[in-house]
Image (cartoon, rainbow, N blue to C red):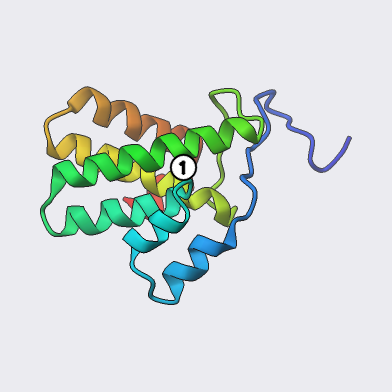
Amino acid sequence: MSIHENLLGGPPPTHLPDDPGPREMLASGTAPVDVAAAHPTSSLAWAQLADEAYERGATVESYAYARTGYHRGLDALRRSGWKGHGPVPWEHEPNRGFLRALHALARAAQAIGEQEEYERCSQFLKDSSPTAAQVLG
């Protein structure tokens, strides 16, 4: 038996490929809008835009940014072999952009009264990464 064998019988964790460009740009202080323009497939950039919009009370704008990051993340997950379910570990840093966008989408959906979407996205976050659900609140 291999140490990496999945004993629970579910799909293996999905690990998105590393794309350090957007992460490094954000860390160096580049505005998220500029990062998203330079790297439109980066869920991390869209999640950051969603967080900033939410913090200033622009919930519809936050929802739109989060939805974009969420869909960009789904595309990346599928390209990485994800089949629609299974772990997306927070511990793998390249997954965090998607997980942050998913959290932001749930939060914004709740703020605009989309209760069903809030519940679906919240459960999806918990199912994908219990750690992310705990860390992101």
Give, as a three-letter code, the residue at label 1: Pro
Above or below: residue 100 compared with residue 21: above
Residue wearing tag 1: 130
Residue lying at 73% horizontally and 30% vertically, measured from the top left: 7
Question: Which residue is at 40% across, 38% downward?
Answer: 70
Number of marks in picture: 1
Residue drawn at (17%, 28%) of the image: 114
Name of the residue lying farthest toward the bottom: 28
Position in image of residue 47 (x %, y %): 36, 51
Residue 15 spot, x, y in % from top left: 64, 44
Please tell me which residue is depicted at 15% across the width and 45% down the height of the picture. 59
Quarter of the figure with residue 122 = top left
Return the x and y of residue 120 as percentages of the image width and height. Answer: 32, 26
Q: Residues within 10 Å of mark 1 (few under 14, many from 20)?
A: some
9 and 54: which is toward the camera: 54
Describe residue 9's horizontal placement relative to residue 65 as left or right: right
Label 1: element kind? helix
Residue lying farthest to the front in this orientation? 38
Q: Is residue 71 above or below residue 98?
A: above
